[in-house]
Structure formats: structure tokens, C-alpha cells
Image (spheres, helix red, strand yellow):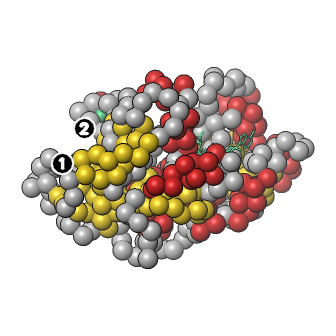
């Protein structure tokens, strides 16, 4: 076991990231040390790389980034019984306190004191990562490791799609970034009758088709709401899955929602968004849900079942695969908006 490892870190306030040699984390009695196989870059990592306003308020350098990963258990603390060295695992990277009101109510995903591994403490862009045993998720070895590395965003998609009825229901996905694209695949896998998708980026619209969307619209060309209303006999969609965080997309989503429909909002707007509450929520009798993270651990159970059943094909999403040292290349590619999910390998490329 080496004493040090390479890690991709935010070392100081400002743009960029740095590869450093740091000590391999030492683990406590209830922790698990995982040797990282594959790790994936999230939109949040891009924000932290670019050092936007949100990052400046939240990130306390130095910290190792990375919260989407899978790997093999290297070592466990003496109190850990549920996993053992050699197990193939991923993890829920939101660590809840267990004591606050929401945790006591069985709503750990909205814990008041949540800490995120890879944001508030050292994460998985490294050869090894330390995780509390409570948050480790054992993976069926049949799940391919490139899928294992993106369970965090897939969990966001599964949480949103399954936050209400979906089978036999029409759905609209607004915004086809990685999570919107995954939501299309999950909604189809869960028997949504027709999935509409809106997206302004040409490349991502073609990805939406590949992921199984039935109708893909460019809201910058023509009236997307009118087209959705026409296609649903004037009724609107049963379910809005908001995956863009864009004000116009959110407003259009509510206009395209049927009376009595469900709006599940995952996308995070940077400003307040004006809504016509009277006509688009109250008179419609709409159900509006904020969606955060993944339910612990209902979402993980549902996601695993869908993957094991082979119902969700995410292959079109995967882009480049690089060793961790080539992170600059990977981040630049993602910034271009053309790449899907880029995987980085801290312990060498898979055979
Ligand atoms: P992303 O930024 O890659 O995707 C957003 C997509 O929306 C982009 O493809 C963009 O072109 C598209 N878009 C922008 N304006 C649009 C418009 N007017 N109409 C239709 N599409 C439009 O983000 P992502 O990584 O896929 O994540 C999706 C959203 O979810 C982001 O806002 C992200 O911050 C948020 N998020 C929330 C949680 C949570 O727990 N609530 C977790 C992860 C991510
Ligand atoms: Zn809590």
C-alpha cells in the first residue's frame, strides 16, 4: 500500500485545478477506503474549475474534487461488516447527519447538515477515496464500470422521473444535458407513453433522439408549447421533468403541462424565475415538486433494479475516456458542450 497518491485538487481560490501528490486517506472504524476505477466529470466540477460565484462561496481549498465514481474496496474500518475488500462499489456522496429533523423523518436527501464528498471534503478524482460505510453502494459485478461511474447523475434522473406516476403518461423533458438525456431513457424504460424533449443545442437534440425521445423540439425555432399542446389533443403533458434550470424552459414547461399534471423540477436556475402561478399552477391544480439529490436509498434500489433488468441504455452518452493526468483535455472538451459523460481513470485505463 503506497503512502501517497495522485489527486486532482482545487489548491487555491481561482480558476483551474492541479494534480498533486497527497497522503492516501487514513480511515476511521466506520469508513471504507476505495481504489477508484473510473470517475466522471459533473457540471458542478466545471463550475468549480471555472471558479464561478457559487464555487467562491462554497469551496474551501485545498480539496480533491470528484463525486461520480466507482471502484474496488481496498480496506475497511474494524466496525464495517456490510462490505469487504474486493467488492465493486459506488457511493452516495451526500453524507447526511442522521440527527436533524429531515433525517429523523426519513428524508435524509434533504438533510440540513449535508456534506458532499468531492465538494466539502476530499473526493474521487484520486487513486483512493474515503467513504463512510453507510454511504457505500455495492454493485452487481454485471454492471459495467462505465455505468458504475455515473450513478450519481443517473440517480438524479431516476429520482425525478419516479417522483410520481410515469407509466402510460406523457412526459416533457426540458433541457437535454446529461441528466435530461438520462431522464429520457429512464422515462421510456418506465413506460412513459410519449416523451417530448426540448433543447436549444443541436448536438444535444440529436442525442435526445438516440436516447429514445419520441418528439424532440428546438424552442428557438417555432412555438414548442403550441406543438406539444397540438400533439396532446390540446391537453398538455401529464408530467414535466425540468432539467435545464433555464427560465424560459421552465415557463414553457408549465405552459405545456396539463391541468392536474406533475411538475418535477431538478434544474437549478441562477436567478429567480417569474411564473404565472394563477394560470399555470393554481387553476391547473398542478403538483409542483422540488427534486434534490437521490432518495437514500430508495433511488439507489430503483436505479439498480432498472440497470440489472437491462432497461436503460446509456451508451450514446459516453464520450472520451482519459487517464486522470489528462484532465485539462477532458474539461476543455466538456466546456465545448459537445461531449457526453467523460470518464477519467486515476489508476490507469481499463484493459
Ligand atoms: P446541463 O447544463 O448540461 O444541461 C442543461 C441543458 O439545458 C443544456 O443542454 C442546455 O442547452 C439546455 N437548455 C438551456 N436553455 C434551454 C431552453 N430554453 N430550452 C430547452 N433547453 C435549454 O446540466 P446537467 O448536468 O444535465 O444538469 C441539469 C440541471 O440540473 C442543471 O441545472 C444542474 O445544475 C441541475 N442539477 C440539479 C441537481 C439537484 O439535485 N437538484 C443535481 C444535479 C444537477
Ligand atoms: Zn440531517
Does the residue tagged 2 have its C-beta within 8 Å of any atom of ligand 2?
yes
Residue found at x 51% / y 55%: 326
What's the mark number on residue 262? none
Query: Which of 98 and 245 lies nearest the eye of the viewer?
Result: 245
Say few, some or many: other residues with alpha carbon within 10 Å of mark 2 (under 14 / 14 to 19 / 20 or more): some
Say if mark 2 contacts mark 1, CB within 8 Å. Answer: no
| Badge 1 element | loop
Give the farthest residue toward the right: 222
Q: Position of residue 127 (x, y in %)?
A: 33, 56
| Badge 2 element | loop
- C-alpha distance separating marks 2 and 1: 23 Å
Tag 2 residue: 98
**Ligand number 1: quarter of image:** top right
Q: Position of residue 320 (x, y in %)?
A: 58, 62
Question: Which quarter of the rendering shows the N terminus?
Answer: bottom left
Q: Is residue 153 left or right of residue 103?
A: right
Residue found at x 17% / y 58%: 76
Residue found at x 64% / y 45%: 335
Residue 47 shows in the view: yes
Query: Which of 193 and 126 lies nearest the eye of the viewer?
Result: 126
Q: Quadrant of residue 84?
A: bottom left
Residue 123 shows in the view: no
Q: Is residue 289 left or right of residue 120?
A: right
Tag 1 residue: 26
Q: Position of residue 338 (x, y in %)?
A: 69, 54
Q: Is residue 64 left or right of residue 255?
A: left
Q: Position of residue 13 (x, y in %)?
A: 45, 27
**From what the image shows, is residue 272 above or below residue 81?**
above
Residue found at x 24% / y 47%: 23
Question: Which quarter of the rendering shows the C terminus?
Answer: bottom left
Amino acid at each position: 500500500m503506497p503512502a501517497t497518491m495522485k489527486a486532482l485538487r482545487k489548491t487555491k481560490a481561482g480558476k483551474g485545478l492541479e494534480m498533486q501528490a497527497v497522503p492516501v486517506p487514513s480511515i476511521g472504524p466506520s469508513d471504507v477506503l476505495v481504489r477508484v476505477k473510473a470517475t466522471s466529470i459533473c457540471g458542478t466540477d466545471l463550475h468549480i474549475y471555472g471558479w464561478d460565484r457559487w464555487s467562491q462561496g462554497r469551496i474551501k481549498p485545498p480539496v480533491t474534487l470528484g463525486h461520480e465514481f466507482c471502484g474496488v474496496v481496498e480496506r475497511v474500518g474494524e466496525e464495517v461488516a456490510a462490505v469487504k475488500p474486493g467488492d465493486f462499489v459506488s457511493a452516495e456522496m451526500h453524507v447526511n447527519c442522521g440527527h436533524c429533523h429531515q433525517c429523523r423523518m426519513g428524508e435524509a436527501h434533504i438533510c440540513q447538515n449535508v456534506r458532499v464528498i468531492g465538494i466539502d471534503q476530499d473526493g474521487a478524482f484520486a487513486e483512493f477515496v474515503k467513504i463512510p460505510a453507510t454511504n457505500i453502494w455495492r454493485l452487481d459485478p454485471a454492471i459495467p464500470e462505465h455505468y458504475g461511474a455515473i450513478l450519481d447523475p443517473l440517480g438524479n434522473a431516476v429520482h425525478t422521473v419516479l417522483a410520481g406516476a410515469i407509466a402510460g403518461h406523457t412526459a416533457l423533458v426540458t433541457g437535454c444535458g446529461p441528466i435530461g438525456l438520462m431522464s429520457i431513457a429512464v422515462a421510456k424504460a418506465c413506460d412513459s407513453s410519449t416523451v417530448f424533449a426540448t433543447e436549444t443545442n443541436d448536438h444535444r437534440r440529436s442525442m435526445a433522439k438516440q436516447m429514445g425521445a419520441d418528439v424532440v423540439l428546438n424552442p428557438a425555432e417555432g412555438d414548442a408549447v403550441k406543438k406539444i399542446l397540438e400533439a396532446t389533443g390540446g391537453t398538455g403533458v401529464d408530467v414535466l421533468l425540468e432539467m435545464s434550470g433555464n427560465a424560459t424552459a421552465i415557463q414553457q414547461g408549465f405552459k405545456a403541462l396539463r391541468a392536474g399534471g406533475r411538475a418535477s423540477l431538478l434544474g437549478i436556475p441562477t436567478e429567480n424565475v417569474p411564473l404565472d402561478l394563477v394560470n399555470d399552477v393554481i387553476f391547473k391544480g398542478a403538483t409542483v415538486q422540488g427534486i434534490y439529490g437521490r432518495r437514500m436509498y430508495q433511488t439507489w434500489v430503483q436505479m439498480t433494479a432498472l440497470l440489472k433488468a437491462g432497461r436503460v441504455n446509456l451508451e450514446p452518452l459516453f464520450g472520451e475516456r482519459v487517464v486522470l493526468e489528462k484532465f485539462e483535455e477532458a474539461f476543455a472538451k466538456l466546456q465545448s458542450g459537445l461531449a457526453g459523460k467523460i470518464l477519467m481513470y486515476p489508476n490507469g485505463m481499463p484493459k
